[in-house]
Image: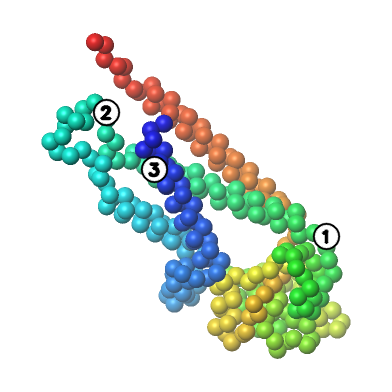
Amino acid sequence: MDPAKNQIGKIGSAFALTSVGVTLYWAFTYSGPYRYLAELQLKWFGVYHQEITAIVIILGFLGIAGVIKLAFRGAERPVPGAADATTTAPVVTHAPQGAWLEYLRYVALLIPFGLGGWAYYNGTHAGNLKQLDAVDFESGKLQAQLVYADVRGHVSGTFLSKDNYLYIPMASEKSKAGPLQLVVGVDKNQMNSYMHREADGKFKVRGMVDKGLEGDVKYAFEKNGFTVAETCWVLHAGREPSSDKLFGMAMIGLGIVFSAGIFVLESYRKKKRTAARPLPAIA
């Protein structure tokens, strides 16, 4: 393999990985350019799209890489008038066209494998169904990042709505007026299926409870006058470990299919390039 091309591939892969990692960090913490673009969409349209926002940022990183590549293009070109000194060895003048896109395809495979692996891991580590109360999350006794449970507590009459997904504060009797430490996330059209009111006025909700409120949701609560605790749990109503494992396996399977497709395509292109090479001249 051409050493120059190999080096370019390593740099391109490292840059793409870093770009994706930084973008995911900004999305999770609702900070940096991600927050700026999200609030710009909210100002203009009243809603913002997570996927489009992340894609725009990644394309911005690729645009920066393209500008840097153009700025340094031709740096390895031979000095005029020194042709005699360079006739014995070929000179690599620039990277092959499409090299960045070539390695970006491989980095893109990390998305289905990463999402699939994370979802499957969650599904296998959520544990058996537990019976919990809102006070269990307020006391700090729970140390796990993710639990599968029936949770009982008082729900607030106010909520946030995000693309038909509602975020409803849940608390114990004593901490109704305190900082948010537990939020129920439920699809607007499935509230009656997943949220059951009991005789004492509490609601019982079954689902996966995840530690950590999304950055944009936390910001929206704070903007509306709520105080959010440093550790805030989200109870995703109706979500089960089996569904996480199934989604994870589906995403991993999709990644395998894409990998096989890329491998077949690259093999075909390699054979085609080999067949098109001219024969060496005979002295």
Residue 91 at x, y percent in the picture: 27, 34
The residue beneath circle 3 is: 8
Residue occupied by mark 2? 89
- Would you call the spot at circle 1 few (<14 residues within 10 Å), some (14-19), or many (20 or more)? few
Q: How many labels does the image show?
A: 3
Residue nearest the viewer, comparing 95 with 224 = 95
Q: Which of marks 1 and 3 is nearer the N terminus?
A: 3
| CB contact under 8 Å: marks 3 and 2 | no
- Left or right side of 106 for 80: left
Observer-side mark, 2 or 1, equals 2
Discs 1, 3 touching: Cβ within 8 Å: no
Report whether 36 appears left or right of 257.
Answer: left
Position of 197 relative to 128 (above/below):
below
* Residue 264 horizontal/vertical position (percent): 51, 32
Residue type beneath disc 3: Ile
Please name the residue that numbered disc 1 is placed on. 128
Q: Measured from the top left, where is residue 129 in percent x and y?
A: 83, 63
Estimate the x, y position of residue 57 in percent, counting from the top left.
Answer: 43, 61
